Every structure is written in structure tokens, then in C-alpha cells.
Amino acid sequence: MLAMAAARLGFRTIILEPEEECPAEQVASSHITAAYDDAEALETLAALCSIITYEFENVPIEAARTLVQKKPVFPPPRALEVAQDRLIEKTFLKDCGIATAQFMAVDSQQQLEQALNDFGGRGVLKTRRLGYDGKGQKHFSGPQDSPAGAFAQLGHVPLILESLVPFVREISIIAARTADGVVVSYDPAENVHRDGILRRSTVPSAASPKAIEAARNAAVEITDQLNYVGVVGIEFFEMDDGSLLANELAPRVHNTGHWTEAACLTSQFEQHIRAIAGLPLGAVDRNFDCVMENLIGDEVEAVPSLLGEPATVVHLYGKKEIRPGRKMGHVTRLGARTGNP
Ligand code: AMP
């Protein structure tokens, strides 16, 4: 999607990605098939590109640090470092003055039992690194959920235990920042997850004006602190009093911003390319109300009938194989725009 947006602005894109015939290859100018940390491939990429970006937060931080010695890398590697580790991320958010769930580092089964006890038996245990789409997580809803064996089940790796947040809704904000500090943000989306995977984003959200303002302000604070350049996605829990707890930040275009491609003058993808290329940001105006739904696993087989729907935009990623839980594409249904937010 970034490569498509870049092409529309006249840029060529070179992809570094280990998988052969990956989705981006279908729309990019060329593809270096190599591991993200392959020294020779990084050397070639840096030699060929004027600007380097990433759209996956598990790119090794060392690769970003190697590249930034040679060419501009946006968002800055520091943002990648913060987002890669949930403990560093939550600590960073706290230092920015942004509220989060309570959290504790957990490095052993014994620490887990102590921490869970401190949270009254309720909490969400997550791997600090490399978790996504609900992978590497375990929910405890009360004393009936025993933590026995949980440290081993999650692979004997560093963990974080968060308090279980009784949120009324989940929202996210997609923002963009330029190198000279201009920040814009789209209308927040209201998100529904199932099994830790995003199912649906609805815009406008039912979030309170107070929550929307807090989300926009948090985006400015976070991106300023990181001297950020590009698009960021930040997910929040909204509480019943309209206050927000930040859950996580993604230093990249974000699944909860895919709707912008169908409903906005400038999509998050084009916005990211503009920001990293030092071009003026585009308007974030929303032309429609909309609901974006992910097509997960064999749901993608409904595409012929989805294409028959009026006011529906279908986007398939061109993945070679359908697998359960795999995001194969998304669909955005548009409706008449109502008042903002
Ligand atoms: P994450 O990988 O942190 O985005 O978590 C995936 C989903 O799990 C979130 O979108 C929430 O629906 C749920 N979740 C994560 N952390 C918490 C928490 N501390 N309290 C309640 N629900 C959570």
C-alpha cells in the first residue's frame, strides 16, 4: 500500500523482504530477497535508496541503525526501539505523561504469581517483544484462572503483566509528523478485536469529545518526544468517564487507518510517503463515514460478492496462501458523512 502510494507521487520503491513473491513485490519497482539483517542486502538497499522506511515493527533495530549511518531512515530508529518492547513502550508513554494500564515486568514464574496477586488475580500477560495479533498473550480474569505454567507456556521469555482494563471502547488515532514538527491526525477509529486480532474499525467513533481531544494531544506529545517523521498509529482504551489509557504505539501505517484509503482525501499511506519525502502533508479530511473490516483467513473467499456491493472498496494483499488467522485483505464500506467526530 505504501509502494502504491509512493508510485502515485512518482517514486520508485525497492523492497527488502525475506519472502519470495511477497505482496509488496507485486507493486514495487524491485525486490531484494534477503533477511532483514543481511549485511550485504542492507548495503545494497542503502546504496540504491534515497530514503528508507519500514512498515513492520519487528525489523531488527540493528538493521535500522546500520542503515541510518548511510541514508535517512524514517521513522527514527528510536521509535522502532520503543515500540519493539512493551515494557520500554509503556515506560516511555508514562514519561510522556500519558496514562496506561498498570504494568509490571515479569521474568519468572514466581514473579508472575506475585504480580498477578498484586493485581487481584486479574491481568493480561504479554511477551515484551515480538507479539502481534494476540500472539504471545494470556488473559487472567480472576482467581479461577491459574497462572501455573504460564511463564513456560509463553516461552520462558521476558514478559509484562498489565492490569485488566475495563474499557468501554477501544479507539486509535493515526497521526503524521513532518521533520519540521507539523502534526496532523485523522478522525479516531473505534476498533473491535477478536482473539487479539483487529476485526473492524468504525469512523466516526462513539468516543467522547474529551477522549478525541486527548488522543490527538497524545499523538502530538509522543511524536514530538521521538522527533518523529512519518505516520504513527496509537491505540487507546476509553474508560467510562471519557479518560484514555494508551495501549500501544505502532511506528508505521496502521491497520486501524486502512479506512483512510477509501474515505479520505489523503490516505495514511500517501501521508507517510509525503512526510518521509519532506513534502507538505495532505488534508486529513474525511469524505465518508465508514466501516473497515479485515478479511481474515477464508473470509477472503467472499470477495466476488463483496465486489457486487455498492459503496464498498475491496483491497486484497495478494498473499499466496490462505491460513487461519491470516489477514488476507480488507473491505471498507462507505456511507454518507455525518457530523464530526
Ligand atoms: P495488544 O496486542 O496489546 O494490542 O492487545 C490485543 C487486544 O487485547 C487489545 O486490543 C485489547 O482488546 C486486549 N487487551 C490488551 N491489553 C489489555 C488490557 N491490559 N486490558 C484489557 N484488554 C486488553
Image (tube, rainbow, N blue to C red):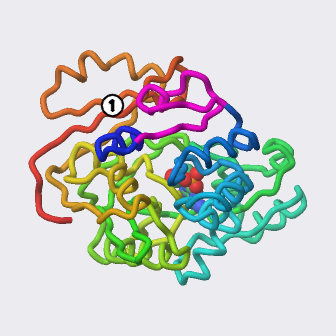
Q: Quadrant of residue 316?
A: top left
Does residue 266 appear anywhere in the picture? yes
Left or right of 76, for residue 254: left
- What's under tag 1, amino acid-wise? His
The percent position of residue 145, horizontal first and vertical second, equals 72, 50
Q: Is residue 108 magenta?
A: no
From the image, which quarter does the C terminus lie in?
A: bottom left
Depth check: 261 or 177 in front? 177
SS class, disc 1: strand
Say whether mark 1 is within 8 Å of ligand 1.
no
The percent position of residue 82, horizontal first and vertical second, equals 64, 65
> Badge 1: how crowded within 10 Å, few (<14), some, or many (20+)?
some
Residue at image point 54% right, 79% down: 225
Residue at image point 52% right, 75% down: 227
Read off the magenta span.
12-33
- Ligand 1 found in image quarter: bottom right
Residue at image point 69% right, 45% down: 43
Query: 122 above or below 244?
Result: above
Query: 302 above or below 313?
Result: above
Left or right of 238, for residue 247: right
Query: 64 above or below 313?
Result: below
Residue at image point 46% right, 40% down: 13
The percent position of residue 99, horizontal first and vertical second, equals 53, 77
The percent position of residue 290, horizontal first and vertical second, equals 22, 46
Q: Is residue 14 magenta?
A: yes
Residue at which label 1 appears: 315
Does residue 173 appear anywhere in the picture? no
